[in-house]
Each structure stands twice: as structure tokens, then as C-alpha cells.
Amino acid sequence: MDMDKLLIKMHTYTKIEAYLMTHRDIRHNPELINKFNQQLNESETKQMLVPIINKTDESLPSQFPASFFFRDDDQLKVKMTQHTRYSTPILHKHDFYELFYVYEGEFTQYINQNNITMRTGDICLIQPGVYHSLDVNNYSIVLNVLIDKETFEKIFFNDLVGDTAFSAFFRTDFFSEKLKTFIIFKTHGARIIQDLILQMYLEILNKSDYYAQVVHSYLLLLFTHLLRDYAKTAIIPKPHKKQDLIDYQIINTIQRNYQSVTLQSLAGQFHYSTQYLSQRIKHLTGYSFSKFLLRQRIQIATELLKTTVQKVNTISTMVGYNNVENFIRTFKRQTGMTPSQYRRTHNTYA
């Protein structure tokens, strides 16, 4: 498929879309929806996500597992589809990242108990665990990009190195299971963003030689442009509840002060006992304070080893280890390699 054929494909209504457009009574009518689903073939059933939205209690939101979309043998766990126009919005969450891009038109998304209008050029990146729905009840062309956690971590944390507030935002959210949020970029239909997304879509559809590496590169370029050109105007929701705000500040403080932060200093800053704060961090991240801090330090160390020529003893100090031997032992225990071995394997500049 080439670009011209892709654009025709995107603008052409599928059989399902044509039917839904002329049968508006189906929307929000469970009986008619079930009757419609029973008439779909196997491919259409999967396209409409019937296997994972069928449940006994219709009042509960749906949960989309990564295993439904990604296979173990996928070269790169990135999927891209066009959202079905005129379909019934499904309130759901998933255990992977989702990026959707409004190529043309506008629609309403429900997220974090708010209705948000998305227009041409808008990009929304949603982290795992966020309940949301897309109501594309018109002609709009919306492209969905699904990215599993490991792939997102590799692209964002390993390749996009930086100590900006925006990077800290993603680091906080990636490691904090209870702080669920999203970010919206207003690109206003910028051609460079549009071209990157369409070229990536073509690669995923065609699966030519080395397509996984090419898609990885396009995602890296996409995030780079979003960071460079749209981070300052990005919409990042703030926590509404006081406890949510405090929780966010606790995790963010650890992320920003990973070289020297201690449980005692953190407890003093937030006026908590060390015991309560330790329990709170475990609740938010799934890790004890020491393990959470260790993950952050090792993550930063791997980034520096991959992308700089700094000496190991310098990196040791930079990530909070005054004793380089202790750093080397800890790094090997966590990664299975010494820092020098890791650098030789991953750093193309070493």
C-alpha cells in the first residue's frame, strides 16, 4: 500500500461504518448492539472488540488487556488502527499506552469524568489504567496507536534522555500505578506531525523488511517533535483531590531528587511519619521506598551509559552512589551486567 491508497482507505467507510451511520438507533441500545454483534464475521467481531466488551454486568467499564492486541512473537508491540466511525462509545481502560490522533474532524472523548472536544491535529496520550471513551459519532478520522509498556519505556526513557519537567511527568506516571493521567498536544494539523503518523501507519500495514525498527524511529521522532514544539502548550490535568496532589508531589520529589533523597528527609518535608510514608509509597507504586528509588537510579544510569561517554565512577556519583564498587555490584545485580558490559552492548558511541 502507498500513501494515496492509504488516504483513500481512511476516507472510505467500511461496511460496518456505513451500516452504523444509517442505523443510529443502535447506539446506546444494548439489545440492538448485541443483535448487531451476532451478525459480524470473525474479523469484524475482533475489529469491534466484541470478545472483550461482552460481559454479564454492563454497568462496569471494560478492561482491554494487552494480550488481546499484542502477540508474544510481535517484532514490535505497536498497533495502529482507525477508530470506527459512528460506533458506540465504550468506557474502558487498558494496561498499555494509547495515543490517538485526530487526522480530520472533531469528536468528544470522556476522560477523568470530563468531556473534552478533540479537533484536527490534536494528540492525546493516555497512560495505562485511565478510564476513557471516544465518541466519534460523525465523519471524523481518528487514528489509534497502541504501545505496550515495555516498548514505551524503551522509546521514551532510554532514547529520549532529558531532565525536563515534561520528562519528570512521564517518569512519575510510568512508575506510579495509582496516579493515572493523560496529556493532550494541540498540533493544529502540523504537517510534520501528520506525515510522521501516516508514514508510521503505512509501515505497520505493509510490514516490510525492518519495519519494526522504522516504526520505532518514527515514534521516537514523533515524541521528539511533541517535546520540542508542543510541551509548553500541552494540557496536563492537575490532581483534583488534595490527597492526589500530595501523592503526586511525593512521587515527583523522589523522581527529581533521586541522587540524595531519603525516606527521613521526605517524611520531614511532607510532615508524615516514615512508617506512614513508606506505606503510602508502596500503595502508589507497588514498591517499597528503597526499591522504588533503586529503580529510578538504575534507569537513569542505563540512560547515561547508553547515550554518553561519562566514566562509570562519574555516573555512579551522578545517580547517588558515592562508592563506585557498590554501584557496580548493585547495577550488575539489577541488570545482569556490569556498567562497562552494559555500555559495550548498548552504547554505539562507546
Image (tube, rainbow, N blue to C red):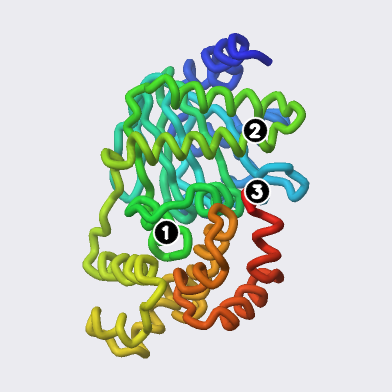
Label 3 to label 2: alpha-carbon separation: 18 Å
User: What residue lies at 46% left-to-right and 35% top-to-bottom?
Assistant: 100
Residue wearing tag 3: 348
Label 1 to label 3: alpha-carbon separation: 29 Å
Q: Amino acid at mark 1?
A: Asp
User: What residue lies at 30% left-to-right and 84% top-to-bottom?
Assistant: 265
Foreground mark, 3 or 2, reads 3
Q: Nearer the viewer, residue 181 or 76?
A: 76
Of pointers 1 and 3, the one earlier in the residue sequence = 1
Q: CB atoms at circles 2 and 1 under 8 Å apart?
A: no
Circle 2 — which element? Answer: helix
Q: Quadrant of residue 216?
A: top right
127 relative to 277 in the view: left or right: right
As drawn, 160 above or below 175: above
As drawn, 217 above or below 299: above
Residue wearing tag 2: 214
Q: Amino acid at mark 2?
A: Val
As drawn, 138 above or below 287: above
Q: Position of residue 56 (x, y in %)?
A: 56, 53
Q: CB atoms at circles 1 and 3 under 8 Å apart?
A: no
User: What residue lies at 41% left-to-right and 45% top-to-bottom?
Assistant: 132
Residue wearing tag 1: 173
Foreground mark, 2 or 1, reads 2
Q: Position of residue 98 (x, y in %)?
A: 50, 43
Q: Position of residue 262 (x, y in %)?
A: 37, 83
The answer to whether one can see residue 39 in this image is: no
Circle 1 — which element? Answer: helix
Q: Amino acid at mark 3?
A: Thr
* Disc 2 residue crowd, few under 14, some 14–19, many 20+, Cα 10 Å: some
Is the C terminus in the top left, top right, bottom left or bottom right quadrant?
A: bottom right
Foreground mark, 1 or 3, reads 3
